C-alpha cells in the first residue's frame, strides 16, 4: 500500500503538472509579432532620454535605418520608469512620462514598441517589501523577487496598467525570467510546497530523493504559473498586447539538477527570446566555440519556442508558430570588449537566425547607421520568411527530463554534448530536422514526422513510450541510440530498456567508455561507401584488414532479442573482460521500422567528427523513415540547409523554400582562447555548384532569392534537381507550382 506521505507527493505532483500542462491560446490580434523581423534594441534604458525630444530622435533615426520595431528598457533594477499607480518608483523624471514619450515617438515613425522589464529585480520594491525576496537555503536574500509572494499580484497589476494606459506600447519583454539557483526558501514557497505535497522543502540536492525532484519541479511550475496568470490578465484587457520573455529554456548552462527556466514557460508566451551571441559558461565547459555555436542555439530556440504553440488539443499543428527571437550581444563577449562588432559579423549572425526562422534582435551598440546593413540584408528576404513553417521530416528529441535527472551534476558531459553533436551531424549532412521535447512526444501528433531520432534520451515516461509504440506501429520510423529509455522520467535506472520491444534488444550491463565497430555481413542499411569507411582500419604494411573502427564514446552492452544485427560491437567492460554484441540492430514493428544503436552517437560526434559515424546516423534515418526527405541537398558540410513551406501542402499557392546558409565565413588568424578571446568573421568565401533535389513535389518554377534568378530544373530519379551557381552568405531556393 502507498504510504500517506508518498500518496501526498504523487497528488501534489499531479496538481503541479496539471497547472502547467495546457498550451496557450491562439493569438488573436498578436499576429504582427510573427511578421516583424527588423528590430532595434536600446539597452541604455530610459535614463538616456534626459531631454525632451530624445525619444523622437532615436525613433526617427532607427526608422530611417530601416527598423520596424524597438525594444527599449522601461524597468530596471532601479524600478519602473513609467508613472505607475502601483508600488514602485513613481517620481521618475517627475513631470514627464518616458514610456509615453517613447511610445508616441515610435507611433509617429510607425515602429512597434515593446518595453523591456528586468523581470525579478526591482531594488526599490525589494527595499519596500523584504518579505517578497527570494531566499537561499540559509534564509539569505539573493537580490531577486519571488513569484510566489505578493510580487506576483503586483506585477499583474502593473502589466494590466501598462496595457490599458499606453496604447502605443505594444507589449513587454521580461529579461532574466528564471528561478535563481539554490532558491527559493521564502515562507510562501515552503508553505505552498507543503500544501501541495505534504513534505517540507528539502535543503540538500539529492537526485535519488523524489521529494527533492518534486521541489525542483515546483520551482519550474511556479514561474510557469506566474507567466500564465499574467498572460491571462493581459488577454482580458488587450488582445493585441504581446508577452515575451528571455527564458533560458533551451540552455544547458543551468546548474546541476534544475534551475533557470523550463520549456513549459514557453507555453504562455507570444515570443520566446534567448541570448545566442554570448555566454560565459558555454565556452568554459567545452561547448562549441565561436562562431559555430549559433546554428545550434538558433535551432534550439526556434523549435522550443515554436513547438510550444503546437502543444495541446486545440492546435494539432496547423497555423503559424509563435515568434521567437534572439538577442545577441555586441559587447560582453570574451574578452568583454564593449565596442561594436564588424558589420560582416552581425549580418552573419542575422543570416543564421533567419535560416531557422528566428527573428534577430540585435543589441543596440552600433547606432542607426551601424544597424542599417542588417536591415538591408533582412528586408528583401522577409517575403520568404513570413508565414513559413519548417517542413517536418526528422524529429529530434531533446529531453529536459534527461538533462536534469540523467545529467544530474554533469548535464553537459552526460547529455547535452550529445545533443549538439547529433545536431552537428544533421547540419553537415543536410538532414531537415526539428527539435521536439518530452511534452511534444507525450502530447503532440507525431504522424507528420517520417522518422524520430532519440539520441541517448535516457529518461522516458510511460506515456511517451506508449505514444512512440503507437507511432511506430502506424508506420513511423524510429532511430534510438545509447541508453535511450533505460531510465524512468525521474532518472531512476530500470532493469531494461523501456522501449526494448521496439529495439529488439535487451540491456546487459552498464555503459563502458568506448569500443570498436565492425561490419557483420550482408545488410540493407549502410551504403557501400559507408561500409568501405568502416573497413578502413588496415595494416599499414600489408593493407590487410586490421580490425574494426574505433568508437570514441560510451557504448552499452546489449543482446539482440528480435532485432537483426547490422554492425558488431567489440568492447572491454569495467572489469577488464572483453565483450561482443550488436552495434546496430534493425527491427520491424507493425508498419514501422526501428534501428537501435547502443552507441552514444551524439557525444562521439561532439568529440570527434568521424565521417563513418555521421554516415551511420544518416543512413539509419533514411532506412527507418516512412518516406524520403522532401528535399535533398548536395553541398559541402559547411553549408547548412533548412526546408520551409509557405501555404498549405498540395495547394497551388504552396511554396517550398530551401535556405542555404554558407557557414564557411573566414575567421581571421587570431588565437581563440576560451573565455578570453573571440574570432570575428570579416569576409565570406562563396560556395558554388550546390545541387538541390525536390522529390515528387509537382513544383515547376525555381528561383534563387533574393533576386529572382531563374534556375533550370532537370529530371533525376525521384524528382527534379536544380544547381545553384553560387551562394555567398545566405540564399534561398524557392520552388513554386
Image (tube, helix red, strand yellow):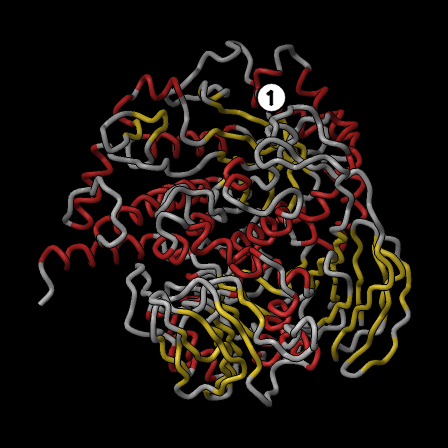
Q: Which residue is mark 1?
A: 44
Left or right relative to 358: residue 15: left
Q: With respect to residue 279, does 554 lie above or below?
A: below
Q: Nearer the viewer, residue 424 or 513?
A: 513
At 35% from the left and 37% from the top, the residue drawn is 181
Residue 420 x, y percent position in the rendering = 55, 55
At 55% from the left and 74% from the top, the residue drawn is 451
Left or right relative to 648: residue 88: left
Q: With respect to residue 46, does 289 lie above or below?
A: below
Q: Quadrant of residue 449?
A: bottom right
At 42% from the left and 68% from the top, the residue drawn is 484
At 21% from the left and 44% from the top, the residue drawn is 193
Residue 64 x, y percent position in the rendering = 79, 29
Residue 304 x, y percent position in the rendering = 52, 54
Whether residue 644 is visible here, answered yes or no, is no
Q: Secondary structure at mark 1?
A: loop
Left or right relative to 554: residue 114: right
The image quadrant where one finds the N terminus is bottom left
Residue 133 x, y percent position in the rendering = 30, 27
Q: Quadrant of residue 422?
A: bottom right
Which residue ends up furthest to the front in the rendered image? 541
Q: With respect to residue 258, does 170 lie above or below?
A: above
Whether residue 419 is visible here, answered yes or no, is yes
The image quadrant where one finds the C terminus is bottom right
Amino acid at each position: 500500500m502507498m504510504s500517506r506521505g508518498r500518496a501526498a507527493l504523487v497528488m501534489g505532483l499531479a496538481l503541479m503538472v496539471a497547472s502547467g500542462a495546457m498550451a496557450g491560446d491562439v493569438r488573436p490580434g498578436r499576429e504582427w509579432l510573427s511578421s516583424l523581423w527588423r528590430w532595434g534594441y536600446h539597452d541604455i534604458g530610459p535614463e538616456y532620454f534626459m531631454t525632451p525630444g530624445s525619444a523622437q530622435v532615436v525613433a526617427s533615426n532607427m526608422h530611417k535605418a530601416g527598423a520596424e520595431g524597438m525594444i527599449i528598457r522601461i524597468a530596471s533594477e532601479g524600478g519602473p520608469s513609467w508613472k505607475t499607480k502601483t508600488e514602485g518608483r513613481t517620481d521618475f523624471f517627475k513631470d514627464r512620462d518616458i514610456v509615453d514619450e517613447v511610445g508616441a515617438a515610435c507611433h509617429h515613425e510607425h515602429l512597434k514598441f515593446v518595453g523591456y522589464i528586468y523581470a525579478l529585480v526591482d531594488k526599490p520594491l525589494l527595499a519596500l517589501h523584504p518579505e517578497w525576496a527570494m531566499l537561499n537555503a540559509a534564509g539569505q536574500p539573493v537580490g531577486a523577487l519571488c513569484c510566489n509572494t505578493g510580487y506576483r499580484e503586483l506585477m499583474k497589476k502593473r502589466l494590466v496598467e501598462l496595457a490599458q494606459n499606453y496604447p502605443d506600447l505594444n507589449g513587454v519583454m521580461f529579461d532574466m525570467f528564471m528561478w535563481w539557483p539554490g532558491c527559493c526558501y521564502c515562507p510562501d514557497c515552503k508553505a505552498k510546497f507543503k500544501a501541495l505535497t505534504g513534505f517540507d522543502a528539502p535543503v540538500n540536492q539529492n537526485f535519488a530523493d523524489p521529494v527533492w525532484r518534486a521541489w525542483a519541479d515546483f520551482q519550474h511550475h511556479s514561474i510557469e504559473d506566474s507567466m500564465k496568470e499574467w498572460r491571462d490578465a493581459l488577454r482580458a484587457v488587450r488582445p493585441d498586447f504581446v508577452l515575451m520573455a528571455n527564458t533560458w529554456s533551451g540552455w544547458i548552462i543551468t546548474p546541476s539538477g534544475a534551475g533557470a527556466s523550463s520549456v513549459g514557460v514557453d507555453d504562455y508566451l507570444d515570443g520566446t527570446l534567448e541570448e545566442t551571441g554570448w555566454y560565459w559558461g558555454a565556452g568554459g565547459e567545452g561547448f562549441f566555440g565561436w562562431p559555430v555555436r549559433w546554428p545550434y542555439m538558433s535551432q534550439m530556440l526556434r523549435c522550443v519556442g515554436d513547438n510550444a504553440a503546437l502543444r495541446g488539443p486545440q492546435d494539432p499543428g496547423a497555423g503559424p508558430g509563435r515568434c521567437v527571437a534572439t538577442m545577441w550581444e555586441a559587447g560582453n563577449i570574451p574578452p568583454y570588449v564593449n565596442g561594436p562588432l564588424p558589420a560582416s559579423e552581425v549580418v552573419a549572425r542575422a543570416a543564421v537566425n533567419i535560416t531557422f526562422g528566428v527573428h534577430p534582435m540585435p543589441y543596440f551598440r552600433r547606432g542607426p547607421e551601424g544597424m542599417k546593413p542588417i536591415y538591408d540584408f533582412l528586408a528583401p528576404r522577409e517575403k520568404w520568411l513570413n508565414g513559413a513553417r519548417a517542413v517536418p521530416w526528422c524529429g529530434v528529441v531533446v529531453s529536459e527530463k534527461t538533462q536534469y535527472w540523467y545529467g544530474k551534476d554533469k548535464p553537459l558531459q552526460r547529455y547535452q554534448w550529445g545533443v549538439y553533436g547529433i545536431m552537428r551531424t544533421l547540419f553537415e549532412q543536410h538532414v531537415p530536422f526539428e527539435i521536439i521535447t518530452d511534452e511534444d512526444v507525450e502530447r503532440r501528433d507525431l504522424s507528420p514526422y517520417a522518422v524520430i531520432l532519440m539520441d541517448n534520451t535516457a529518461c522516458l515516461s510511460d506515456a511517451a513510450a506508449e505514444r512512440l509504440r503507437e507511432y511506430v506501429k502506424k508506420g513511423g520510423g524510429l532511430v534510438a541510440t545509447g541508453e535511450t529509455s533505460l531510465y524512468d522520467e525521474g532518472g531512476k535506472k530500470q532493469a531494461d530498456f523501456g522501449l526494448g520491444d521496439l529495439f529488439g534488444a535487451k540491456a546487459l550491463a552498464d555503459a563502458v567508455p568506448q569500443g570498436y565497430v565492425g561490419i557483420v555481413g550482408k545488410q540493407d542499411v549502410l551504403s557501400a561507401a559507408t561500409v568501405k569507411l568502416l573497413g578502413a582500419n588496415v595494416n599499414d604494411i600489408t593493407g590487410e584488414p586490421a580490425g574494426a573502427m574505433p568508437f570514441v564514446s560510451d557504448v552499452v552492452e546489449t543482446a539482440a532479442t528480435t532485432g537483426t544485427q547490422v554492425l558488431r560491437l567489440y568492447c572491454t567492460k569495467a572489469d577488464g573482460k572483453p565483450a561482443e554484441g550488436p552495434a546496430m540492430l534493425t527491427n520491424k514493428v507493425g508498419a514501422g521500422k526501428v534501428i537501435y544503436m547502443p552507441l552514444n552517437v551524439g557525444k562521439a560526434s561532439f568529440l570527434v567528427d568521424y565521417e563513418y559515424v555521421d554516415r551511420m546516423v544518416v543512413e539509419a534515418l533514411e532506412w527507418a523513415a516512412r518516406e524520403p526527405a522532401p528535399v535533398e541537398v548536395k553541398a559541402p558540410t559547411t553549408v547548412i540547409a533548412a526546408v520551409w513551406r509557405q501555404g498549405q501542402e498540395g495547394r497551388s499557392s504552396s511554396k517550398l523554400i530551401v535556405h542555404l546558409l554558407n557557414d564557411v565565413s573566414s575567421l581571421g588568424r587570431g588565437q581563440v582562447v576560451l573565455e578570453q578571446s573571440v574570432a570575428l568573421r570579416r569576409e565570406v568565401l562563396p560556395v558554388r555548384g550546390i545541387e538541390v533535389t525536390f522529390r515528387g513535389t509537382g513544383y515547376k518554377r525555381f528561383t534563387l532569392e533574393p533576386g529572382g534568378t531563374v534556375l533550370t530544373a532537370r529530371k533525376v530519379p525521384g524528382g527534379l534537381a536544380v544547381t545553384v551557381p553560387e551562394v555567398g552568405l545566405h540564399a534561398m531556393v524557392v520552388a513554386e507550382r
